[in-house]
Image (cartoon, helix red, strand yellow):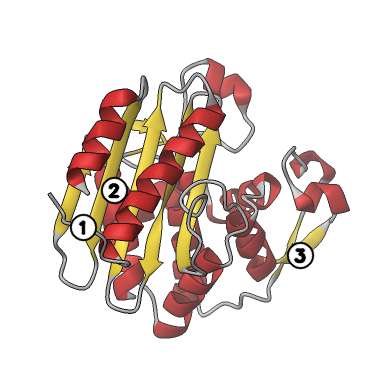
Amino acid sequence: MKHMIRQLLQETPYNVHMIVKDLRTDETFICERPDAVFSSASLIKVPILLAVLHHVQSNQGSLHQVLTITPEDWVDFSGISEQQLVSTTIYELLVWMIITSDNTATNVLINYIGMDALNRYFREIGLTHTILQRKMMDFERLANGVDNVTTTRDMAHIFTHIYRQDLLMPSFSALAIDILSRQRVHDLLRRYLVDDVRIAHKTGGLDAVDHDVGIVYGDSKDYLIGVFVTEVTNNQDARQLIGRISKVVYEYLVQQKGALT
């Protein structure tokens, strides 16, 4: 497995940050560029998901609380905007934010919690380099060099805790995994997998980055895989690379084809 992945990494012109870890034993098989900071794209929505659930839990609130959405909140790449919704529940916003990476839903939730409070929660749960600095689709701030960032180590950290279900009360921990497992973007980690495997994951992409990270649940092994590609010039090539790496890992760790070396 390691040899085949090294070969894929040597052949690509892009920078690849990645992690593969057995979540049952905590053994790390592969870890590339763990502390290099990169643009998170929509990966930032995972800690936002946990932060919102934590906020509702801490304040004994309800996921059925209705939040107001103004037309000014509507942005592109959003089913909320397509429907021209002017209100919906926290629960629905969380679901759309993850499963279709809805940008309007994300921005409404950022308004609900506050950017400072979100970043404070990120630090409280041990994310050392994950920072929310702009809303979704705020290309003016992005053009000025202000972006949302993370690292491989931070993404491994947060998904390990999601797997262990030790950040939130049991019902909210289970809900976070359920929502991540309903992901509708399947052209990266799942791209070349023929088995009907359960993956609780989140994708992220911009013109120069493509990411996918999550938990793969197998009969004999549950593992964490995150592949983060930066300095991308062709998104389709980057997504195919993520798919190839994912297939190699799956075949060795789940289907147990070949050796790890």
Q: Nearer the viewer, residue 117 or 220?
A: 220
- The reply to whether callout 1 and callout 3 are in contact (CB within 8 Å) is no
Q: Nearer the viewer, residue 247 or 141?
A: 247
Residue 62 appears at what percent x and percent y?
61, 78
Give the labeled residue for mark 2: 154
- In the image, residue 192 sits, relative to residue 74, either above or below, namely below
| CA gap, disc 1 and disc 3 | 49 Å
**Amino acid type, label 2:** Asp
| CA gap, disc 3 and disc 2 | 31 Å
- In the image, residue 227 sits, relative to residue 140, either above or below, namely below
Question: In what element is the residue under mark 3?
Answer: strand
Within-10-Å neighbours for mark 3: few <14, some 14–19, many 20+: some
- The reply to whether callout 3 and callout 2 are in contact (CB within 8 Å) is no
Question: In what element is the residue under mark 2?
Answer: helix
- Which of the labelled discs sits on residue 258, or is there none? 1
Q: Nearer the viewer, residue 251 or 199?
A: 251
- Which of the labelled discs sits on residue 88, or is there none? 3
Within-10-Å neighbours for mark 2: few <14, some 14–19, many 20+: some
150 displayed left or right of 185 = left
Decide if residue 37 is in sight here.
Answer: no
Instruction: Name the mark nearer the viewer: 3 or 2.
Output: 2
- In the image, residue 177 sits, relative to residue 226, either above or below, namely below
203 displayed left or right of 223 = right
Within-10-Å neighbours for mark 1: few <14, some 14–19, many 20+: few
